Image (spheres, rainbow, N blue to C red):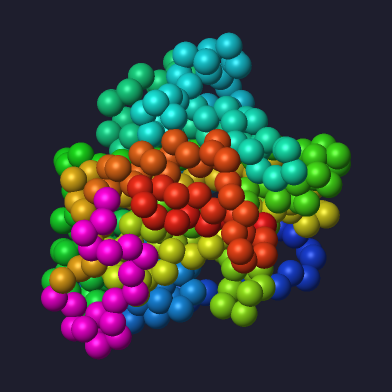
Amino acid sequence: MTIDTKPPVPHYVHAPLTKENLTYADLGIVDLAKAATAEGRAELAATARDALHNIGFFYVVNHGLSQPETERMFDIADVPFSQVPEKDKLEFHANIIESGSFQGYKPRKYWHVNGGVQDEIETYNLHRDVTKKQHPQQLKPYLPEIAKFTGHNHDILNTILRLLAIGLELPEDTFVDQHGWDDENECYLRFMKYYPRTAEDEEKAEKVWLKGHTDGGSITVLWSQPVSALQILSQDGQWKWIRHMDNALVVNAGDCMEFLSGGFYKATIHRVIQPPVDQQGYTRLGILYFATPNEDIKLLPASGSPVLERVGIRRRFEDKDAPTVEVYRKGRTAAYGKSTLKQSEEKGIEEEIVSGVVVKHYN
């Protein structure tokens, strides 16, 4: 008989699924059970290619963790928030502006959201090598599991990156080589907890919890959870909800992937808003893996892609002005939610300049 020696962890109870009739985005599904063969990868690459070119998001299933294993990771994800006293968290606050990195705690009310309202989002961010930093005492018993989980996320990332390279008719490891586990890059795990806001703040912020934005990195892997709040801006200009799928991942491209793919893979605009009425009052716990290419890479379109030769390259800056990943990453991280935004000529859009690139925020 196998004895489970894992340390006990308090169980986090998610909100029940909403019963409201929401308008959901129609996303493709990438089944990683098919990724073991070249034929399977070719099929999945077409799905991933079309999804990131046309929409920017897709689901991943059969990623290698069972439902109970995923549920335990959500239990562990809540530990930095519910089990660590507020006074102890101060020791582990991230120096976001100075370092351009989120590693550690981002406290609530750090970002400006809308209408003078600050965010009610707490995050705890861990480098993919969990030994790089110190962690709260309450989290230490779970670090071996977190380390294994983070490595598993990076393996999933590598599979996705291979599919995206195939989609551009590039060598399979083109993007994998740019996200080396042992290289200098900011691939990291995030535990994220949204707390309910007052009715007054909801009105001031027009129910926006995190304004519309693109991610700054290359690929974001989100572990699906039941509270409906994430929306994407569809091609018809409408905000559509992301449907929860049990034990699935929601994957999207960020700015770095858009730059590296010559605009072929879109960094899709997404936001987080107040949940439906039947889920209001609940916290919303998230697990994400943010991938960013190696720090010294210049954000230039991939060369030698027959796909880009056929469809052309869509540029957001000239090649000579391309920043390195490190410069762009640090600039976006330090500025997000803290900089003064300028009103764009486009209605409902605010702008800032990061490393010579126009970054837009949507309300």
* Residue at screen point 50% across, 49% down: 352
Q: Is residue 208 left or right of residue 155?
A: right
* Residue at screen point 23% across, 44% down: 295
> The magenta stretch spans which residues?
304-323
**Relative to the observer, which residue lies in front, 272 or 341?**
341
Q: Quadrant of the N terminus?
A: top left
**Residue projecting furthest to the top:** 87
Q: Is residue 70 visible?
A: no
Can you say whether 321 is above or below 210 in the image? below
* Residue at screen point 71% across, 51% down: 208
Can you say whether 146 is above or below 53 in the image? above
State the image coordinates of residue 53 (x, y, percent, origin top left). 40, 76
Can you say whether 105 is above or below 311 in the image? above
**Relative to the observer, which residue lies in front, 175 or 144?**
175
State the image coordinates of residue 140 (x, y, percent, origin top left). 40, 21
Marks counted in the figure total 0
Residue 108, image quadrant: top right
Residue 185, image quadrant: top left
Q: Quadrant of the C terminus?
A: bottom right
Q: Is residue 254 visible?
A: yes
Residue 255, image quadrant: bottom left
Q: Is residue 33 left or right of residue 121?
A: left
**Relative to the observer, which residue lies in front, 123 or 311?**
311
Please say whether residue 7 is one of the residues in the magenta stretch: no
Q: Is residue 139 left or right of residue 278?
A: left
Please say whether residue 320 is one of the residues in the magenta stretch: yes
State the image coordinates of residue 86 (x, y, percent, origin top left). 60, 16
* Residue at screen point 48% across, 61% down: 250
State the image coordinates of residue 111 (x, y, percent, origin top left). 60, 36
